């Protein structure tokens, strides 16, 4: 059978390379694509993440209406680019109505199936569309960049601190590799990004505002990650205890964005950004 | 008296031949109207001659051509041929003793034709699940000894009063060993079953306990009991063939000789019982009946089966297909005994579970799982 160690190194190389490539594409789109460019990028990423989520649901005996769900997920960022928040509300409403009509006409559809159809679209599409909404705020480009760098810093700092001085497990049953020390490091990283890069957006956010946003964003990133880990764990081979592997990985990679984008958007609004 | 018209699919295998023994004992009660096998042309033609059977079919087209030549008439061949034979409606009861997932279509065709299905092909239910039971669950009579035992324990009892099913397992030849011991097991050791003499594939499945896992899933579909209420217990003497526990704590157990002709005959005679030439159980000399918990950490295939069953959809079909590939590889001396569970688990993790919408969906899942499993072979 194959050598686990060389495979591990090769996997790490591939992961780093693909992360760098993906990061590069996102930055190019952010700076040169305008709101629409970003909306299209979000639509593609969200659609791929949604297919992964629905696959997890199917492993749990649910039958989501993936056609409706993914259509809604693709529509949401695009609609947000044109009509903002009220557009998003309209798409969710349309999805709910369409799902209920489907539920009425097809006898084998159960409440849990319709629920997962709507939740899947909301969990991935509605949340990530808030990146587009942030982009549309004053100084939106820099704010989006700050948010992205903040999440990245959270991962990197948590990993660096956790792997060197990490001792107390954060959530052993959900994510065995996370530690409290890592969490502290990650939070420091995110706050640092918001304090250093945030002012470049020139939106008049005070230091204390940036500090709070950084802290909450960091918490949101960790919760996004833990929630997604729980979903994967539930859909895994429970009795055998073996977890689903990376599985495509869009959901894995963007799980922090899901919670951070909604939380950041509303905090920016509360801080007075227009 | 009108005889029961019986078709036997897989007439040259262990179950098929024993079924013909039963038919030979009761010529006034059973008329064998059709036989099907994969490619044992000599044996099938001999059986057809002995029982006066005109309708025969072979899964292998070349074998069918050979048979056609010898009989100077057309003998159907190919996968569809057996399915068509099953669905013709010429038999009152079809015994599906085919091996592997290929039996699924035959099971569905049988039930769709209105006939009763004596099911020895557990893979039909494992892979097909509700696709099979939706066609007529009340016309399925299990031939597997454990399920026949449960079926008999359920006669006369309202299904809603069932609290739990207890499937007994002999434990296989490696009962009591740990995972470390099992890594170096040879094919010959694995084929030495303590109590039953069966075909090679099922004997290996018995050693890995995947056979018991498939039986758990089969029991879930046959009797509508949830996985949390289906328990496996190791019973080395294999005298008790399984048990049913009822809501009031009462337990019915089925005991009998270790002879597959009994459940086969019961499937033919149900709801009656005919006499059988088996050694009756002599309780005065029986000695002890022992029970032990099953070592689910060492015998990982059983756990994987519970996982697959709980997940549902096409995952059990994928698990079953991966298992067939892995067991064949072990019998060919290409992999170790403990690799079987590894391969099955890997295929299950890689599988994108789809709902059970059609036989085609099941066959697609089966085919994909075989490809993924084959890629993991050295």
Image (cartoon, rainbow, N blue to C red):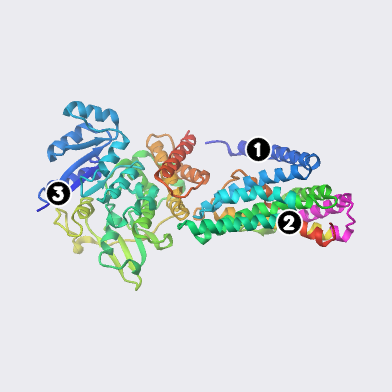
Q: Read off the residue under disc 1.
A: A9
The Cα–Cα distance between marks 3 and 1, rounded to whole angstroms, is 66 Å
Residue B190 vs residue B376: left or right? left
Q: Read off the residue under disc 3.
A: B30
Give the secondary structure at mark 1.
Answer: helix
Q: Read off the residue under disc 2.
A: A85
Residue A28 vs residue B99: left or right? right
Mark 3 residue crowding within 10 angstroms, few (<14) / some (14–19) / many (20+) = some
Residue B220 in the image, given as x and y percentages of width and height: 38, 57
Q: Nearer the viewer, residue B234 or B359?
A: B359
Q: Nearer the viewer, residue A261 or B171?
A: A261
Give the secondary structure at mark 2.
Answer: helix
Can marks 3 and 2 be said to lie on one chain? no
Q: Nearer the viewer, residue A168 or B213?
A: B213
Q: Is residue A201 magenta?
A: yes
Q: Please name which of the two marks, 1 or 2, marks the residue nearer to the observer.
A: 2
Residue B98 vs residue A99: left or right? left
- Chain letter of disc 3? B
What residue range appears in magenta?
A: A184-210
């Amino acid at each position: 059978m194959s050598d686990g160690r060389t495979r591990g190194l090769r996997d790490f190389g591939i992961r780093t390379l693909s992360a760098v490539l993906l990061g590069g594409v996102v930055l190019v789109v952010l700076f040169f694509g305008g709101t629409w460019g970003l909306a299209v990028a979000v639509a593609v990423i969200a659609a791929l993440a949604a297919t992964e989520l629905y696959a997890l649901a199917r492993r749990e005996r649910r039958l989501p209406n993936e056609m409706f769900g993914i259509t809604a997920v693709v529509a949401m960022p695009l609609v947000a680019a044109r009509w903002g928040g009220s557009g998003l509300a309209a798409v969710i409403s349309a999805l709910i109505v369409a799902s209920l009509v489907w539920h009425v006409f097809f006898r084998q559809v159960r409440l849990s199936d319709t629920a997962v159809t709507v939740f899947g679209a909301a969990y991935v599409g509605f949340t990530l569309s808030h990146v587009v909404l942030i982009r549309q705020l004053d100084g939106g480009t820099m704010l989006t960049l700050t948010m992205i760098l903040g999440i990245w810093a959270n991962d990197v700092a948590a990993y660096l601190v956790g792997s060197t001085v990490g001792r107390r497990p954060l959530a052993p049953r959900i994510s065995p590799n996370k530690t409290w020390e890592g969490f502290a490091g990650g939070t420091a990283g995110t706050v640092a990004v918001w304090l250093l890069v945030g002012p470049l957006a020139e939106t008049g956010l005070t230091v204390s505002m940036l500090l709070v946003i950084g802290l909450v964003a960091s918490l949101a990133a960790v919760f996004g990650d833990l929630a997604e880990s729980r979903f994967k764990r539930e859909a895994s081979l429970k009795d055998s205890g073996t977890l689903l592997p990376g599985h495509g990985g869009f959901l894995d990679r963007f799980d922090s964005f899901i919670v951070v984008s909604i939380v950041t958007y509303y905090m920016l609004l509360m801080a007075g950004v227009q | 008296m009108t005889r029961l018209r019986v078709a036997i699919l897989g007439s040259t295998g262990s179950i098929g031949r024993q079924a013909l023994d039963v038919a030979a004992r009761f010529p006034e009660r059973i008329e064998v109207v059709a036989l099907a096998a994969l490619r044992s042309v000599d044996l099938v033609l001999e059986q057809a001659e002995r029982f006066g059977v005109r309708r025969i079919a072979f899964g292998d087209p070349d074998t069918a051509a050979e048979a056609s030549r010898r009989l100077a008439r057309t003998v159907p061949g190919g996968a569809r041929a057996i399915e068509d034979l099953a669905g013709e409606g010429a038999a009152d009861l079809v015994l599906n003793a085919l091996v592997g997932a290929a039996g699924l279509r035959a099971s569905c065709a049988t039930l769709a034709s209105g006939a009763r299905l004596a099911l020895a092909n557990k893979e039909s239910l494992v892979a097909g699940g509700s696709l099979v039971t939706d066609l007529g669950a009340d016309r399925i009579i299990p031939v597997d000894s454990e399920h026949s035992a449960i079926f008999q324990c359920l006669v006369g009892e309202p299904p809603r009063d069932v609290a739990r099913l207890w499937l007994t397992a002999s434990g296989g030849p490696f009962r009591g060993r740990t995972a470390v011991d099992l890594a170096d097991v040879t094919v010959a050791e694995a084929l030495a079953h303590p109590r039953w003499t069966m075909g090679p594939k099922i004997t290996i499945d018995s050693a890995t306990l995947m056979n018991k896992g498939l039986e758990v899933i089969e029991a879930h579909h046959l009797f509508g009991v949830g996985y949390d209420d289906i328990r496996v217990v190791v019973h080395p003497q294999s005298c008790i063939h399984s048990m049913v526990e009822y809501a009031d704590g009462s337990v019915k157990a089925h005991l009998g000789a270790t002879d597959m002709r009994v459940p086969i005959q019961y499937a033919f005679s149900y709801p009656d019982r005919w006499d059988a030439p088996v050694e009756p159980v002599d309780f005065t000399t029986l000695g002890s009946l022992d029970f032990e918990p099953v070592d689910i950490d060492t015998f990982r295939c059983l756990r994987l089966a519970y996982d697959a069953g709980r997940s549902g959809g096409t995952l059990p079909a994928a698990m079953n297909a991966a298992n067939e590939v892995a067991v064949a590889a072990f019998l060919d001396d290409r992999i170790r005994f403990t690799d079987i569970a590894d391969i099955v688990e890997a295929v299950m993790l890689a599988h994108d579970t789809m709902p059970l919408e059609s036989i085609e969906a099941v066959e697609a899942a089966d085919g994909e799982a075989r490809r993924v499993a084959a890629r993991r072979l050295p």
